[in-house]
Amino acid sequence: MKKIFAALLAGALAISLVACGTSSSTASVASAGDSSKVTSAPASETPTLDAIKQKGKIVMLTSTGFPPYEYLGDDGKPAGVDIDLAQLVADDLGVELEVIDMNFDLLIDALKSGKGDFIAAGMTANEERATHIDFSQSYTANGLLMVVAAGNDTIKTAADLAGKTIAVQSGTTADLYANDEVEGAKVLTFNTPIEAGTAVAGGKADVAIIDNLPAKSIAESSNGKLQVIEGFITEEPMAMGIAKNQEDLVEEIDKVLAAAVKDGTVEALTDKHYEIAGA
Ligand code: GLN
């Protein structure tokens, strides 16, 4: 786990450094005793944050079944890295966090229609999605892995996917990959990657394509039925999603994520939830 995270962190840090370089400070300081420099506040530059503070809560949209980022805890409530990171944003704003759990393929429409303030769902920031929503800085360098039945040695590289029955979570980058990049694949879609893994364990699919840590967590929890093929078949930054034209909320989330990556919080939360969810 440590080694995996070190590699992830190197990528995430590089991204956060770029983010820090572009942040700007708008505060201006009047010289001591010169009150004439203090002007009345302009119209709010943070309308989204003002509205969230007014409501007293920030609403996160997610999709559980994706450990360690989001899964159902023993109390039946969503838990995971994304929930804890979202709580840091809520704490920083002094508001409550509400979490709404839904199928992954509904998240972007739900955000666009105002059902929540942001998406935190291990979501890959990609160009197509960025035409619909904005993304925060990346907090984890992620990639897709292949998961096969234990002992299956017919699938070793992405080239071996051709013509296979592939299980994926609907609406994910794995779904896109299986449909767009693999010749002659039969693609079976499921609501969660756990169900995709179960299809492989039960012999209904040859292989599942799942994000890095969820793939490892699901394989570890499979009682030896599943194995992960090492090596990313894609590389994809994970980020949070924010509706268009809400720059103030993007900046707020970036600020919290940059600090959490830098001071080791993301690493600690990832280790913690991987242990809990994989148990
Ligand atoms: N990272 C993948 C995507 O964005 C899967 C995310 C998920 O299943 N929660 O499509």
Image: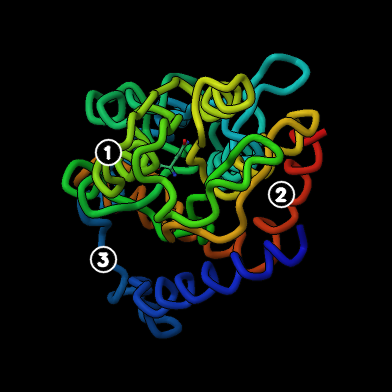
Res 53 quadrant in image: top left
Q: Which residue is found at the position 57% from the left and 27% from the top?
A: 200
The disc labelled 3 sits on which kind of residue?
Answer: Thr
Contact (Cβ within 8 Å) of mark 1 with mark 3: no
Q: Tell me the element at label 2.
A: helix
Q: Please name which of the two marks, 2 or 3, marks the residue nearer to the observer.
A: 2
- Comparing labels 1 and 2, the label whose residue is closer to the camera: 1
In the image, 181 versus 62, the foreground residue is 181
In the image, residue 112 lies at what x, y percent? 23, 30
Residue at left 35%, top 45%?
162
Above or below, comparing residue 181 to residue 150 in the picture: below
Query: How far across and how far down the image is residue 179, in percent?
Result: 27, 38
Please count the marks in the image: 3
Out of 256 and 177, give the one closest to the viewer: 177
Q: CA distance from mark 1 to mark 3?
A: 66 Å
Residue that numbered label 2 is attached to: 269
Q: Position of residue 35 (x, y in %)?
A: 35, 74
Q: Position of residue 206 (x, y in %)?
A: 51, 33
The disc placed on residue 39 is: 3
Asked if one can make out residue 186 in the rendered structure from this viewpoint, the answer is: yes
**Label 1 sits on residue:** 184
